[in-house]
């Protein structure tokens, strides 16, 4: 089947392709990201090479692959982020009310548009201010050295002991969450991610139960910090939320979003980058911007068209679902040698509010990882195990052997 020609426009031309003519073959459906995670790069780059926009009949969504088209969709207000309640295929289950996790998720900044989104983003920035982020750097470096010790040779699972622990504990430090609560926070964050980020809307009651546990915990923290405010991130969030006139449900919902987004992408980013360094790229895998483009920790974001619009020569109708394939745009730009700025953090108003935090975490941890590789760290065993998440891929295990380091890389 033929793909769409490169074109971007707002009006409907007579030559614009419809779903029937823009459909991709089954072997290029993004559903394969769950079935064959190791083949993601081949799949998405092939899609992007065939054209900037395709209709995927197997997930009933438009796939936007070209960098120009990705930027257009993310910046255009005719594409809504309200995926849970926009369009016939995106409504919460019948009977949903404020007690459901779908209703809680719908209050998050991630799924709000226009002035609502900007209002919530101002609140989030109180937590993610440059001063607050920079103040964390010394503790980040101490934690990186603790989790990846170079003076004690031996084996460790990089995923479980480093890639997951580092962002979780940094997040706890930022927000002021007690370390004894972090296991519960992680379980709830995993559940929220399963509800929000996948290709399918999950109704698994156990996942929703764990997510609700985290939400109720966040609601309690919000109320406690209002009674007794401090210098921690949650206190800053509550003060900013009160200034904006948010109610407790909005505030707690967005605290949950900050928790989930604060560490869900980092385990995949760190584990895939470490594997790349140990198998092919060496320490060049630890250049942060390059790694963000190469890995693209969050591979896509969802939108719903609110009006008819032409993108990439294809006719997108109001109510159509759209998957904006950040990874495809990054990988296509990289392979073509264009050197375009990566889109790993999105674009426009919805560009990730925590981008600076993620960049600092990556820089600090990458320095430590580079020292380990330079000192002779190597993989133990063969074969890769993936988490099966189509959007937020990560290795589930990465056994490595640490060699003894006699001096930091900077001293050599």
Image (cartoon, helix red, strand yellow):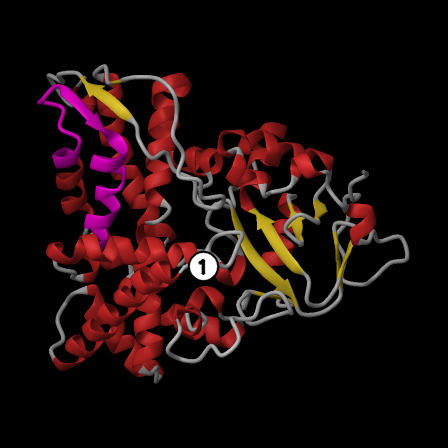
Q: Measured along the vertical axis of the image, is residue 380 above or below residue 16?
A: above
Which quarter of the image is occupied by the C terminus? top left
Q: Quadrant of residue 131?
A: bottom left
Which quarter of the image is occupied by the N terminus? top right
For the residue carrying disc 1, how many other residues have a C-alpha within 10 Å: few (<14), some (14-19), or many (20+)? many
- Residue at 35% x, 56% y is 191
Q: Residue furthest right?
A: 14
- Residue at 31% x, 40% y is 362
Left or right, 253 with reference to 61: left
Give the residue pinned by disc 1.
Answer: 196
Q: Measured along the vertical axis of the image, is residue 233 above or below residue 138?
A: below
Residue 162, magenta (yes or no): yes
Left or right, 172 with reference to 241: left
Answer whether residue 215 is visible to the viewer in this image: yes
Relative image position of residue 398 (x, y in whole percent): 30, 27
Q: Measured along the vertical axis of the image, is residue 245 above or below residue 62?
A: below
Residue 361, magenta (yes or no): no
Magenta span: 145-171
Mark 1 element type: helix
Relative image position of residue 243 (x, y in whole percent): 30, 82
Q: How many marks?
A: 1
- Residue at 18% x, 80% y is 226
Q: Residue furthest front?
A: 205
Relative image position of residue 227 (x, y in whole percent): 13, 81
Q: Quadrant of residue 178?
A: bottom left
Left or right, 407 with reference to 62: left
- Residue at 19% x, 51% y is 136
Relative image position of residue 152 (x, y in whole percent): 9, 22
Q: Measured along the vertical axis of the image, is residue 408 above or below residue 314?
A: above
Answer whether residue 76 is visible to the viewer in this image: no
């Amino acid at each position: 089947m033929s793909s769409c020609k490169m074109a971007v426009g707002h009006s409907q031309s007579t030559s614009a392709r419809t779903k029937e003519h823009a459909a991709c073959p089954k072997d290029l459906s993004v559903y394969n990201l769950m079935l064959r995670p190791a083949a993601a790069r081949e799949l998405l780059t092939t899609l992007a090479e065939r054209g900037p926009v395709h209709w995927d009949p197997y997930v009933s969504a438009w796939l936007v692959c070209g960098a120009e088209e990705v930027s257009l969709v993310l910046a255009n207000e005719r594409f809504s982020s309200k995926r849970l309640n926009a369009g016939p295929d995106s409504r919460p289950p019948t009977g949903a009310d404020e007690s459901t996790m779908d209703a809680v998720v719908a209050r998050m900044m991630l799924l709000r548009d226009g002035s609502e989104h900007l209002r919530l983003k101002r609140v989030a920035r109180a937590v993610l201010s440059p001063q607050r982020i920079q103040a964390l750097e010394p503790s980040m470096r101490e934690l990186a050295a603790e989790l990846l010790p170079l003076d004690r040779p031996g084996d460790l699972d990089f995923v479980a002991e480093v890639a997951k622990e580092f962002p979780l504990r940094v997040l706890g430090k930022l927000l002021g969450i007690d370390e004894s609560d972090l296991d519960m926070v992680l379980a709830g964050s995993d559940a929220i991610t399963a509800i929000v980020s996948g290709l399918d809307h999950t109704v698994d009651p156990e996942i929703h139960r764990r997510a609700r546990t985290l939400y109720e915990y966040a609601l309690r923290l919000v109320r406690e910090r209002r009674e007794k405010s401090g210098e921690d991130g949650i206190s800053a969030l509550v003060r900013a939320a009160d200034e904006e006139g948010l109610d407790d449900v909005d505030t707690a919902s967005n605290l949950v979003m900050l928790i989930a987004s604060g560490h869900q992408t980092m385990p995949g980013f760190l584990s895939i980058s470490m594997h790349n360094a140990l198998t092919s790229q060496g320490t060049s895998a630890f250049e942060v911007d390059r790694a963000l483009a190469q890995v693209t920790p969050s591979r896509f974001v969802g939108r719903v068209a609110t009006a008819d619009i032409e993108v990439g020569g294809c006719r997108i109708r109001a109510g159509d679902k759209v998957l904006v394939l950040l990874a495809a745009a990054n990988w296509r730009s990289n392979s073509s040698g264009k050197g375009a700025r990566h889109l790993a953090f999105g674009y426009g108003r919805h560009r990730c509010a925590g981008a600076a935090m993620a960049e600092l975490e990556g820089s600090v941890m990458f320095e430590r990882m580079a020292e380990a590789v330079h000192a002779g760290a190597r993989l133990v065993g063969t074969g890769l195990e993936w988490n099966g998440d189509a959007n937020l891929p990560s290795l589930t295990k990465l056994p490595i052997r640490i060699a003894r380091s006699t001096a930091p890389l900077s001293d050599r």
